[in-house]
Structures are given as C-alpha cells and as structure tokens.
Amino acid sequence: MNSMLERLGAFAARRSWIIIVGWLIIVGGLLGARQAYGGEYVNNYTVSGTDSATGLDVLNSTFPSKAVTPARSCSTPRTVRSRRSKPP
C-alpha cells in the first residue's frame, strides 16, 4: 500500500497539469449531472400532531412577525463555554 501511494504521489507531482485537468473534468461532470438530473431542494413537509408542530402553530398565530420556519429555528440543551470564559 505504501509503495502504491508513493507512486501515485510521484505521478501527481510529475504530471500536475493532468491531475488538475482531471479534477476539472470530474467537477464539470458532477455539475452537469446535477443540472441534468438534480431536483430542487424542498423544505415544506409537516408532521401534524407533534409537539413541535403544535408549538409552531401557536407561535405563528400569536407572534406572526416573529415566527420562523422550522429549518431556521435552532435550540441547544446546554450552554457551551470555552475554558477561558468566565461563568455568568
């Protein structure tokens, strides 16, 4: 395995332009495949009856200007502090 990686590294060092062109072809192919076969990002699903959906409905009806979509809301169960920061 070591000798194979050594040969691969030596080839990449000697023929750097081939490696760069190869990567550009791969990236171009992936972008073309995404354009041809890729779909659109969809974030409009709901799971009714859950506590989260109920809470979001209450938030939307009570504070419509402050309501956020579920993808933009974020919560964390604990506070993370660095070792250098002083506790509040």
Image: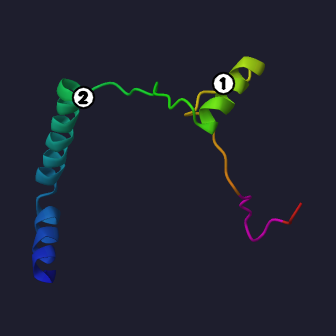
Q: Which mark identifies residue 57? A: 1
Q: Is residue 71 above or below residue 4?
A: above
Q: Is label 1 in contact with label 2 (beta carbons under 8 Å)? A: no
Q: Is residue 20 visible?
A: yes
Q: CA distance from mark 1 to mark 2?
A: 32 Å
Residue at numbered disc 2 = 38
Q: Name the residue type under label 1.
A: Asp
Tell whether 32 sits left or right of 76. Answer: left
Residue type at tag 2? Gly
Q: Position of residue 5 (x, y in %)?
A: 15, 74
N-terminal-most mark, 1 or 2: 2
Q: Residue at x 10, y 74 (%)?
A: 7
- Disc 1 is placed on an element classified as helix
Q: Tell me the magenta residue range.
A: 78-85
Q: Nearer the viewer, mark 1 or mark 2?
A: 1
Residue 57 appears left or right of 22: right
